[in-house]
Structure formats: structure tokens, C-alpha cells
Image (cartoon, rainbow, N blue to C red):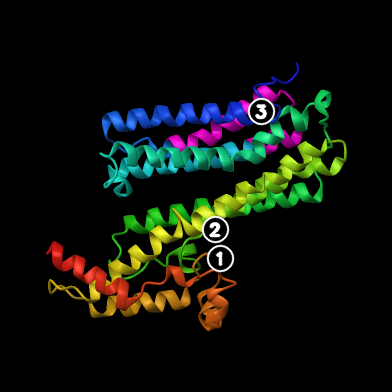
Amino acid sequence: MAPVHALDRYYLGITLLVTVGWQMLGFFIAWTLQFDKITDFTGGSNFFVLALLTLLIGNTFYARNIVASILVMIWATRLAGFLLYRVLKMGSDARFDDIRSHFLKFLGFWIGQIVWVWTVSLPVVILNSPAVSDPADGGSNPGFGTSRDIAGIVLWALGWVIETVSDAQKTYYKSTNPPKNKPNTYGLWGWSRHPPYFGEMLCWWGIWILTISPSTNGTLTGGARAAQYGAVVSPLFTMLLLMFASGIPTAEKPQARRFFLMSHNVQGDVDHGAWAEYLAYLESTSILIPLPPSLYRVLPRILKRTVLLDFPMYQFDERTDGMQALEEQRRDA
């Protein structure tokens, strides 16, 4: 059977329509019932839907297409399952407390989720499309098992293991009722302050590397080859999102604020060692790339702030952020 030619030869239109429909269905349910149980699950599961859909309608079951699609579906299943488990256990997601009852603000989150899913799925969507895989449209089966293929799979596997293990370790750590005045340094969290984000970045770089291999065959049209390389926006978007938007920035300062207030609590319940403990943790724990604390601790600060990505924008300033936190605490007291 020939591939289904749906809207365009790269499957960009059909996958956008499916993503919009899937997310708007989730939004309608979440808004109507005013709960968070399916919000993250809808995002994660959407990746599974797009990978499976394009593989089936592409109908060119080459080894590369199958492997890449399965890797995306494995990643999506774990992510969606973990996030669903977490929100069911917590009962709600505090991230949405300020927007859940505001139609346009809540809708804005779901629109952002549409952009995230569709953009990050591009490598596997384009790989499965007729433009790349259908011989009648200039595509071909260039074989499988090149060194680039192996590199992509290894990178994905390393990222998936880091992401999976670190999420499991954090879940276990929280179940032990740990002391509130000490940061989590259990397992991978002692080597990185955000190991799941690092793992996710590796996964999508691995997927992109795996999916661009057919372009080395030389039979693809210039447009198809350019589209495959252009799909680099997927891992780049993942990195930008986690480093400058919904990832590290939403975690670093709030956590620092919590430890700062433990040591400067205007209500009298003060733990003077909490802030010092946290500052020592920052000096010995890499923000993203896992490194042994003994090594990270002795590295020059300039290296940490540049090559190792611990940018000044993540830093909690005691004079500005700290004073603002204390003022807010006084108003809420």
C-alpha cells in the first residue's frame, strides 16, 4: 500500500490539526471540570498519537521509521504515565492555581502545549512522511545501522535512563519524609539539580540524529533533505524551553526562596542553617549536566556560569529577590 498523502507531503498539516484537536479536547474537559488530572497527560500522550499516526499512514515500515517511532512512543508513554501518576497522587497541580479559573490564561497554557508537541515531534513526523520515505516522491530506504544511527539510539537511551531514574529517585526521596531544611541530593540529584531536564534534552537530540540519517543517501530532493535538517528545531526548542521558560527558571528561584525564608522567617520559625545549607548545595551541585560534587565544587565560577550553563539569571539575589520574598511574607502574615 502507498502512503496516505494528507494535506502536504511532509505531514505538517495533518499533525497540526490532530494536535490542535487533541489539546482542545483536553482543554474542554479540564476547563469544564476544573481539574488538572489530564493536563500533562494530554501533552505527553499527544507525542504517542503523532508518532503512531504518521508511521501507519506513511506505510513505509523501514527499520529506521519503526525504531524512531517506537522510541518516541516509549518516551511519551513514560512521560504521560509518570505525570498522570504524580498528579493523581498530589490531587492537583499548583502550577495552575492562578490560571485554572481564568479562561484565556488557561487556554494560553494549552496553546503553548500545542506548539510544544507539534514542534518537538517534527523529526519523526518528517521521517515518516512521503517526502522522505516514499520512493514515488523521491524518498528511499537507505538501510539502517550506520554509526550515526547507533549514536542517535545511544544518546536517546542515555537520556531516557537519566530521565526515568531521576524521576523515580525523586519520588522515592519524597516518600521518605526527608528533612525540609535540606535540598534533595539523593542519587542523580546529588550530581545535577535538574537531571530529568538533561535527560529529556538528550532524548530529543538522539531522535533527531537518528531521523536525519536517510539524507546521507543522496536520493532525497533538496526540500526533503532541508526539512530533515530543519527539524533540528525540535531539540533546540526543547533546550530553550527547559532552560529559559517552563523548566529551570520555574524551579530554581522558587526553591531558593523557600530556603531563604526558612532562615529569615518574619513569623519567628527560623532555621538559620537552611540558607547556608542551600548555598553550599549550589556550590557543589551542577545545575544541569551531571557531575560529581567533588569535581564541580572546585571548578572556577566563570566555567560554571558559562560552559556548565548556570547563568546569572537563575541566581536568587538576597538583596532584591530576598527582600521581595520577605515583604510578601509580611503581607501574607
The amino acid on which the numbered mark 2 sits, given as a three-letter code, is Phe
Numbered label attached to residue 55: 3
In the rendered image, residue 154 lying in the magenta stretch gets the answer no
Residue 142 in sight in this render = yes
Q: Residue furthest top?
A: 1
Residue nearer the viewer, 22 or 160 = 22
| Quarter occupied by residue 299 | bottom right
In the rendered image, residue 65 lying in the magenta stretch gets the answer yes
Residue for badge 2: 198
- Is residue 263 left or right of 268 when viewed as pictured? right
- The Cα–Cα distance between marks 3 and 2, rounded to whole angstroms, is 27 Å
Residue 65 placement (x, y as % from top left): 71, 34
Question: Which residue is located at x 49 percent, y 34 percent?
Answer: 45
- Is residue 228 left or right of 291 when viewed as pictured? right
Residue for badge 1: 289
Residue nearer the viewer, 28 or 7 = 7
Q: Are marks 2 and 1 in contact (CB under 8 Å)?
A: yes
- The Cα–Cα distance between marks 1 and 3, rounded to whole angstroms, is 33 Å
Residue 162 in sight in this render = no
* SS of the residue under disc 1: loop
Residue range corresponding to the magenta coloring:
42-69
The amino acid on which the numbered mark 1 sits, given as a three-letter code, is Ile
- Is residue 6 left or right of 223 when viewed as pictured? left
Of label 1 and label 3, which has the lower sequence position? 3
Residue nearer the viewer, 46 or 234 = 234
Question: On screen, 247 above or below 319?
Answer: above
